[in-house]
Image: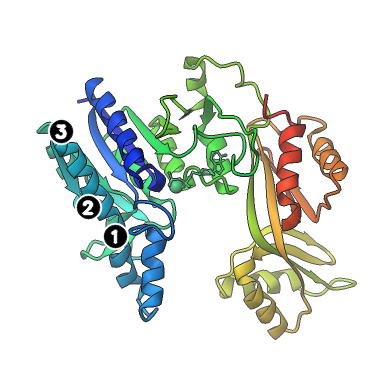
Amino acid sequence: MRIMVQKFGGTSLSTVQAREHVLRHVKRELEAGFSLVIVVSAMGRRGEPYATDTLLDWAAQNGNALSAREKDLLLCCGEIISATTLSSLLEHEGIPTTVLTGAQAGFVTDDNFGNARILDVRPVRVLEQLQSGRVVIVTGFQGQTENGDFTTLGRGGSDTSATALGAALHAEMVDIYTDVNGILTADPRIVEDARPLTVVSYAEICNMAHQGAKVIHPRAVEIAMQSQIPVRVRSTFADSEGTLVTHPEGFQDVQTGIVDRYVTGIAYVSNVTQITVEVPGGADRLQLKVFKTMAENSISVDFINVTPLGVVYTVFDSDSEKAIQVLQEIGLKPQSLSGCAKVSVIGGGINGVPGIMARIVESLTLADIQILQSADSNTTIWVLVKKEDMVQALRALHASFELHL
Ligand code: ADP
Ligand code: MG
């Protein structure tokens, strides 16, 4: 059996026209001889009838008191509706299908409701159904604990369902269908001339995804990387092959002149708060106190700079009030700047290339954008800017590294 996994995201299933495109991709790969496993997300976006956010709003309007376990049970309905809808459309075309929930498809997770981690995938029933010549439709984003409770995998979880199933089934390819033409050099909603990348390494896209490029979930890439399963990110609404995600040795199989790039793309995380705790002359174990307090209160920290005179770091805006409060409670006087954005320049080969930082500083300075903080690693350079400068910063950096070419 040549197994292919196809994953269709929310916007790929939400209209009649979109679902016609889905049928087209399914028929094409069946004709090419693949045994197909289709992973679906809930249909549409907030406000549309069965979207995940619509279900969350529904719960909020009706008592707003669901426990995490019960909330997961509600959320599982979204994918069940899209899976059964697709089943009906395919059967109507004479294509035999079987719908399996995450649990029936063999996803075993821990009991961290709302953000569960996959512990194992036992796709016995998926294989049985494939062997009997049926297309298997699996509800993405969900699994089951060992004792039978439904769980969900967190935002972007259907991507993870798709690559985890691909790995468990030793699929030849996992195709992630979405509403853009692949992985682009930046979010096309912000940078209009962002360009689709023909091929990226697992490491490059994993890094971009961790830095905020939400076109694919980083966990999904990590799983594909561990099992060396090739992934394509491509558009439901077009026929182009999109972006191939593979290991760098796989690049030579792809006709492209761009693998020598040192910057791959630009990403962002908005809505973060910069916190500064300064102590003139330094103070005994101040740094330790700050980070211990953050950890004890489950506040995740990022962009950390520690100096003898104090610390500066970021938290999500949603955590900032609590962060300030707990710091004050231990006698510190933190300063905070909310409404910041972390902009990242990501590449495979930034390490040691002279002049990259100069180019970043130059293009932001020319655009009159203040850099609040910066840091770098061998694959990424981060700058913190005010949120109102974020769009301009992304466009300036994209142009400066000529990523549109
Ligand atoms: P789906 O519902 O199909 O999973 P998502 O909304 O999760 O779709 O992901 C697709 C979106 O990711 C695009 O519409 C685009 O705005 C956004 N995006 C952010 N960064 C990138 C990038 N570098 N390349 C492509 N898309 C990106
Ligand atoms: Mg997504």
Residue 7 lies, with reference to residue 151, above or below; the image says: above
| Mark 3 crowdedness (10 Å alpha carbons): few <14, some 14-19, many ≥20 | some
Q: Position of residue 175 (x, y in %)?
A: 37, 33
What residue sits right under mark 1 in the picture? Answer: 76
- Precedes in sequence: disc 2 or disc 3: 3
Q: CA distance from mark 1 to mark 2?
A: 9 Å
x then y, percent, for residue 82:
28, 50
The residue wearing badge 2 is 101
Please say if 3 is above or below 86.
above
Residue indicated by mark 3? 95
The relative height of residue 6 versus residue 258 in the rendered view (above or below) is: below
Most foreground residue, 361 or 177: 177
Residue name at image x 32 percent, y 71 percent? 69
Residue 143 is left or right of residue 375, and the answer is left
Rendered image: mark on residue 29: none
The front one of 55 and 135 is 55
The response on whether ligand 1 sits within 8 Å of label 2 is: no
Q: Amino acid at mark 1?
A: Cys
